[in-house]
């Protein structure tokens, strides 16, 4: 049974990685895309560590497809922060309850705060004032990705959310 559980988790992780690649092709501006919605979903369903992996992979894929417009070092920082963001969202949902409205709102706000207001100043030394031009598109993309994730999670059948191979989050 343990191998079957691991195989199901691996399969869902691979599916979410593929969805990150598809989302990375739906650009909002430069490397800002819909690559993080599957990562948010993975953080909720599979836990913080897999969510972090998906966030890092999703952003680096999006940046690569855009030709690393802000340079590789900048995108490595952004990818790392996406991992931190997904880890935080996954941890909050796992720790406090995945389906409680207050927890959902808290995790989404924390995800936004890490992804935009914390990340933008961290990039300032690398990009100087130009980073603030990304604040609005990054805010829009983050909100769209979070809402898309929450809608997808809400419409998933209960049997999927309660599957034995998930992080036990239902």
Image (cartoon, grey):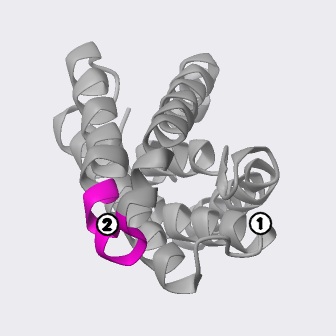
Task: Please say whether residue 123 is one of the residues in the magenta stretch.
Answer: yes
The residue drawn where x is 54% and y is 18% is 154
Q: Position of residue 156 (x, y in %)?
A: 63, 24
Task: Please say whether residue 147 is one of the residues in the magenta stretch.
Answer: no
Q: Name the residue under label 2.
A: 124
Q: Which of 20 and 123 is in front in this view?
A: 123
- With respect to residue 157, does 75 lie above or below? below
Q: Which of 166 and 28 is in front in this view?
A: 28
- With respect to residue 4, does 137 lie above or below? above
Q: Position of 132 compared to 157: left or right?
A: left
Magenta span dominant secondary structure: helix
Q: Quadrant of the N terminus?
A: bottom right
Q: Position of residue 80 (x, y in %)?
A: 40, 72
Q: Position of 116 compared to 26: left or right?
A: left
The span shown in magenta is 119-128
Q: Position of 64 compared to 100: left or right?
A: right
Q: Distance between the residues labelled 1 and 2?
A: 21 Å
Q: Mark 1 points at which residue?
A: 66
């Amino acid at each position: 049974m343990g191998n079957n559980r691991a195989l199901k988790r691996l399969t869902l992780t691979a599916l979410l990685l593929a969805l990150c690649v598809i989302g990375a092709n739906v650009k909002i501006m430069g490397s800002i895309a819909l690559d993080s919605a599957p990562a948010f979903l993975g953080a909720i369903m599979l836990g913080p560590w897999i969510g972090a992996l998906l966030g890092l992979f999703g952003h680096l894929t999006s940046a690569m497809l855009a030709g690393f417009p802000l340079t590789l070092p900048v995108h490595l920082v952004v990818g790392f922060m996406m991992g931190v963001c997904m880890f935080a969202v996954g941890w909050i949902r796992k720790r406090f309850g995945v389906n409680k409205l207050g927890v959902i709102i808290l995790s989404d706000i924390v995800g936004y705060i890490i992804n935009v207001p914390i990340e933008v100043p961290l990039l300032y030394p690398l990009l100087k004032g130009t980073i603030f031009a990304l604040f609005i598109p990054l805010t829009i993309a983050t909100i769209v990705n979070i809402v898309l994730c929450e809608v997808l999670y809400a419409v998933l059948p209960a049997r999927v959310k309660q599957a034995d191979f998930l992080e036990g989050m239902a």
